[in-house]
Image (spheres, helix red, strand yellow):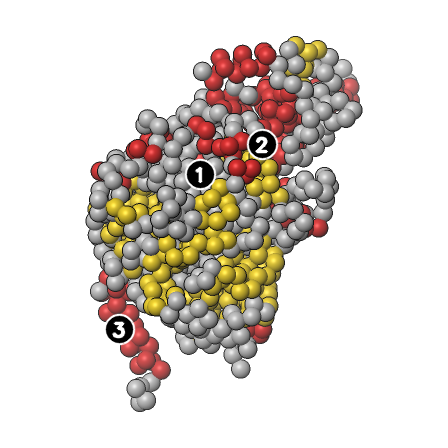
Amino acid sequence: MGRMSRNGLLVTGALLSSVLMASGSMAQTTASAAGKDWTTPAGTMSGQRYSSLDQITSKNVGKLQVAWTFSTGVLRGHEGQPLVIGNMMYLDAPFPNTVFALDLDHDGKIVWKYEPKQDPNVIPVMCCDTVNRGVAYGDGKIFLHQADTTLLALDAKTGKVVWSVKTDDPSKGATGTDAPLVVKDKVYVGVSGGEFGVRGWFAAYNVADGKQVWRGYSMGPDSDTLIVPDKTTDLGKPVPANSSEASWQGDQWKIGGGDTWGWKSYDPKTNLIFYGSGNPSTWNPKQRPGDNKYSMTIWARDADTGAVKWLYQMTPHDQWDYDGVNEMVLVDQKIDGKDRHLLVHFDRNGFGYTLDRDTGALLVAQKYDPAVNWASKVDMDPKSPNYGRPEVLPQYSTEHGGEDVNTTNICPAALGSKDEQPSAFSPQTGLFYVPTNHVCMDYEPFRVSYVAGQPYVGATLSMYPPKGDTNMGNFIAWDATKGKIVWSLPEQFSAWGGALATAGNVVFYGTLEGYLKAVDAKTGKLLYKFKTPSGIIGNVMTYEHAGRQYVAVLSGVGGWAGIGLAAGLTDPHAGLGAVGGYAALNQYTSLGGSLTVFAVPQN
Amino acid sequence: MTKHARTFAIACIFTCLSTSFVFADKPGNPAAVTSQDGKYADKDGNPTYKVDKDGKVDFYSYIGFVRYSANCLQCHGPDGLGSTYAPSLVDALKSIDYGTFLATVAGGKKDVSASQQLVMPSLGENKNVMCYIDAIYIYLRGRSDGAIGRGRPAAHESKPAAFTTAEDSCMG
């Protein structure tokens, strides 16, 4: 190699990537750390959002500078992240979901751009802004789940449509916002629409031709959910036949929600794919008696057949809109001196769960925000009839309060102690880095009627910071083996940008005011911050190009966080007109849609 | 008519037209002049709010807050203040009247261009909205006039029997 010219090296690099491309989806790494490329939404299929790149370190990150920027041309919430494969970067925008392919060898020149033609009538059935959480890559194709539930495969080289299939019906309120995940020869997607009574599903399509391979619903008969009676387990116990239908009144499960708009991860050792299901519809718990299975559930399915290996419902009979869709991070750590294959999940309900991902056994369930009050704890006694269930406090139960009664001071608020903004894990420190919300609410449920394609909500909410606090977010480091916060950095607004951990002992995240922040992975010490053009609800990623490490993040405020942009949150304890911590976000940032890419200056 | 006089006349027509146009579009004086079963109306017969000196609101303003927050807040933000993707109704209701409000909610509205894609759905078939549309209007009218503050109204008149009857027959 010593004799090889720089050109020769490049040729070798190109050959290597062609070889990888030729072997199709093998270009996505099954390793737990991302390297030079960033090939899946979370960097790798483990969902760790960890990179082995170490050119940017806790020592030099203070010198970080903006290397280049790119505008998506859309002024809506930007929740996703770019992908980098070789010399190409791929990213997409919120509705109309424009996809860009940028050439990193030529200063981000646009190689191709694809703008789907979608009926704008899909916009108002998107509950919380027209976000999209990113594209996926595999088999030489870029995959996009459009707002109107079209799953699209584009030729990664040319941007030409290879195939396109409809996954659901937006006229009934179903929309596509999730980032697909490609594993081997299949691409996996879920659906949004919990506020419209859309019955959730998770499906696998062939990357080659877009043919649906399997689809497992969140609720309904076993033939729909792909639960295998007496084989699928729930906390180690076999699940009886048609357990989902039995947990609903009549056929309410048909409009029961449990949507699947979050992140997906995959373990090649067991061939299991993991994701979560969201809130049961409606938000009025009185109207849907029963456990409402399997909303609010962690799912482990066989990636080839969809058969459910195990599941765990975290919030039976939800009364607060605590969707269970947040990321499932797959890590290998020791618990009590024993090597374990873990799945770690920070739920909207405020509990951080650690499970054995091979068996679904529950190992740890602890609050990751001390403000969480709706449940005292999760019952961890395997002999208890309530094993695995939260111990709900009646004063914070909107079911107990009943219809037309305002239940007050519930923590967390409906947006959860954390929403979709993904956490990161560093195998160097063994810690999780979690952007969180620190917000409470009043919740008043009432009767609603169902009309297909119309909002089916049934509750009124007001949100505010926990009593005595002025910060509405925290960025925390979490030990998932013990269920303990290691350090916590207060943020004025909810920390709604996804985190990145790197081998340089640096953790990055974005804030709603628009700051990209870099902190020391061990101590949480702030090492660098830069204010991007708009609030950040996108996720930080990193890649290496031409021997140099870059860090990139989308800014563009919106999403559910955007609801509060103009209004801010009211403070019931200080009266109206309160400022400071409760000030409106529009005093700090404005709409935008930009990618900002950072690097440490050379020399 | 001299040229000068004609110019003046044309100018007057425009001024008068535009003036009356603006007046016709504004919601008008919100003062409640009539009431029936706890529901108040202004001098033109349009629904309106009533807030007493202690801040206690009429029942319709209160239920309007509840239903607004369940059906409209997702886009138009808490307390009608707008979001990153839908306009403030506190501002909008300063310049549209009751009829325009009803027509917009029932029929929806589109403002799609290269720089923005604002789409409001047609809610005419949605009972959760239409059975409470007067209440939502009354609440937002009070918000727009600054008569009703942010958050849940602290006190409200009791639920009129007529409200329950109308609600039951509308929701089915």
- Are the residues under marks 3 and 2 on the same chain? yes
- Which label was assigned to residue A406? 2
How many angstroms separate mark 1 from mark 3 (CA)? 53 Å
Question: For the residue labelled by badge 1, is the local secondary structure a helix, a strand or a loop?
Answer: loop
Q: Which residue is mark 3?
A: A15
How many angstroms separate mark 1 from mark 2 (CA)? 16 Å
Residue B57 relative to residue A358: left or right = right
N-term mark: 1 or 3: 3
Above or below: residue A271 compared with residue B81 = below
Give the residue type at disc 1. Asp
Q: Label 2 crowding class (10 Å Cα cut-off): few <14, some 14-19, many 20+?
A: some
Give the residue type at disc 3. Leu
**Residue found 52% across the figure and 37% down from its top:** A394
| Observer-nearest of A497 and A110 | A497
| Observer-nearest of A576 and A541 | A576
Residue A62, position as x, y percentages in the image: 58, 73
Q: Which residue is mark 1?
A: A318
Residue A237, position as x, y percentages in the image: 28, 48
Q: Indicate which label's residue lies in the foreground, 1 or 3.
A: 1
Question: Furthest-bottom residue in view?
Answer: A3
Above or below: residue B15 compared with residue B115 = above
Give the residue type at disc 2. Asn
Residue A536 sits in which quadrant? bottom right
N-term mark: 1 or 2: 1
Q: Label 1 crowding class (10 Å Cα cut-off): few <14, some 14-19, many 20+?
A: many
